[in-house]
């Protein structure tokens, strides 16, 4: 798949096979460590929004063809939170951290709380060490840390390297010198994450919130609306589709539009299928360049349980 993206030509794949995923042993039959999964993937499509609509439509068609009649479509868009983070004034390293944690809402909110009090993270670090670190001179950090460890008779334990320690301590040092994230920005992000509405009403709610804060996300909301139109054109009834601004699925590699299909028999916490955009994944596994990609997968055993009524 990574090689297919290297050519720059569009490529589409489907698969059906056994998947292995670590999960705690809880006895829940809907969460086995080994299960079957069927999926579809689209790479380097000329119209990304059109490809996303096609993926959603094929997923919905597949669960209907299997006999499932009652299900709920849930939508999200990491492109919106990315645009919002770009619009809010803050250091780039803070944006990177918040994006890293977005798919884990509790961790995201903890990080947001830390940014409102950035100096607190430095309290456990010796002041003499922090004062000796200059965020504007990262090349000097490792020797400074090495001298500090030697003077204290300490050694690096575990698998962490001095280089990794330097990276983290430079962040803490920079944060200790930074102004806290304004309360108004924290409140905006928290309010954004709380927005949940029927998909067709979502951008209206988002625009109202943004106008109160004097912000504009550029084309991000227009892209979302166009995608909804394209999904509807593919034959999907989105009247009952729900949008959640804080929804990012439980995988960090998603980079834009995301969706899930859930059935009443199993509940929202056990989706039958889902997917979204993951433009950086091919590069992470070997591609020499970024390849636009979108796909979806169906947990076929969950689908069977849902069709049988749980």
Image: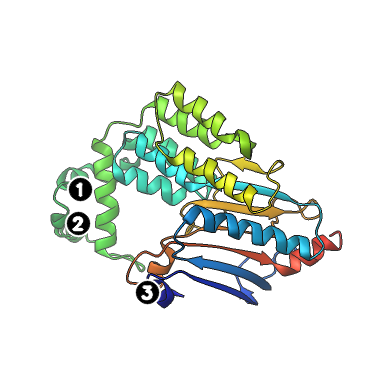
Residue to which mark 3 is pinned: 7
Q: Above or below — where is 208 with respect to 243?
A: above
Mark drawn on residue 145: 2
Of residues 35 and 8, the one drawn nearer to the viewer in this rendering: 8
Within 10 angstroms of label 3, few (less than 14), some, or many (20 or more) residues?
few
Specify which label sits upstream in the sequence, 3 or 2: 3
Mark 1 / mark 2, whichever is N-terminal: 1
Per the image, label 2 sits on a secondary structure element best described as helix
Foreground disc of the pair 1, 3 = 3
Q: Can residue 198 be seen in this view?
A: yes
Q: Can see residue 24? A: no
Image point (26%, 55%), residue name: 167
Q: In this view, does 89 lie to the left or right of 232?
A: left
Checking the image for residue 74, the label placed there is none
Q: Quadrant of residue 285?
A: bottom left
Who's the residue at 69% across and 56% down the image?
271
Q: Tell which tag, 3 or 2, sits nearer the viewer.
A: 3
Furthest toward the right, the residue is 308
**Residues tagged 1 and 3 counted as in contact (Cβ below 8 A):** no
Q: Is mark 1 on a helix, strand or loop?
A: helix
Which of the two residues, 298 or 163, is positioned nearer the viewer here? 298
Left or right placement of residue 42 versus residue 23 in this view: left
Which label sits on residue 129? Answer: 1
Residue at position x 46%, y 21% in the image: 212
Indicate how the structure is coloured in the image: rainbow
Residue 280 in which image quadrant: bottom left
Marks 2 and 1: in contact by CB < 8 Å? yes
x and y, in percent, of residue 24 in the image? 64, 64
**The C terminus sits in image quarter:** bottom right
> What is the spatial separation of the Cα atoms under label 3 and label 2, in whole angstroms?
45 Å
């Amino acid at each position: 798949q990574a090689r297919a993206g290297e050519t720059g030509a569009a490529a589409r794949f489907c698969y059906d096979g056994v998947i292995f995923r670590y999960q705690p042993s809880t006895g829940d039959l809907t969460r086995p460590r080994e299960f079957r999964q069927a999926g579809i993937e689209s790479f380097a499509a000329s119209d990304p929004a059109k490809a996303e609509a096609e993926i959603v439509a094929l997923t919905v068609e597949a669960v209907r063809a299997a006999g499932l009649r009652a299900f709920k479509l849930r939508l999200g868009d990491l492109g919106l939170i990315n645009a919002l983070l770009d619009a809010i004034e803050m250091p780039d390293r803070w944006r990177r951290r918040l994006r890293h944690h977005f798919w884990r809402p509790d961790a995201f909110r903890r990080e947001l709380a830390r940014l409102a009090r950035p100096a607190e993270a430095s309290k456990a670090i010796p002041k003499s060490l922090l004062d000796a670190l200059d965020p504007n001179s990262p090349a000097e950090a490792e020797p400074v840390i090495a001298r500090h460890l030697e003077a204290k008779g300490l050694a690096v334990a575990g698998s962490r390297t001095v280089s990794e320690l330097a990276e983290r301590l430079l962040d803490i040092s920079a944060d200790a010198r930074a102004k806290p994230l304004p309360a108004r920005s924290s409140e905006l992000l928290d309010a954004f994450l709380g927005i949940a509405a029927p998909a067709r009403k979502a951008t209206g709610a988002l625009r109202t919130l943004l106008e109160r804060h004097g912000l504009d996300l550029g084309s991000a909301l227009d892209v979302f609306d166009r995608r909804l139109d394209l999904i509807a054109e593919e034959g999907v009834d989105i009247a009952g589709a729900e949008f959640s601004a804080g929804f990012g699925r439980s995988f960090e590699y998603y980079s834009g539009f995301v969706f899930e299909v859930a059935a009443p028999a199993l509940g929202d916490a056990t989706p039958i299928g889902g997917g979204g955009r993951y433009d950086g994944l091919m590069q992470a596994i070997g591609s020499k360049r970024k390849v636009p990609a979108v796909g979806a997968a169906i947990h076929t055993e969950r689908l069977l349980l849902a069709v049988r009524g749980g």
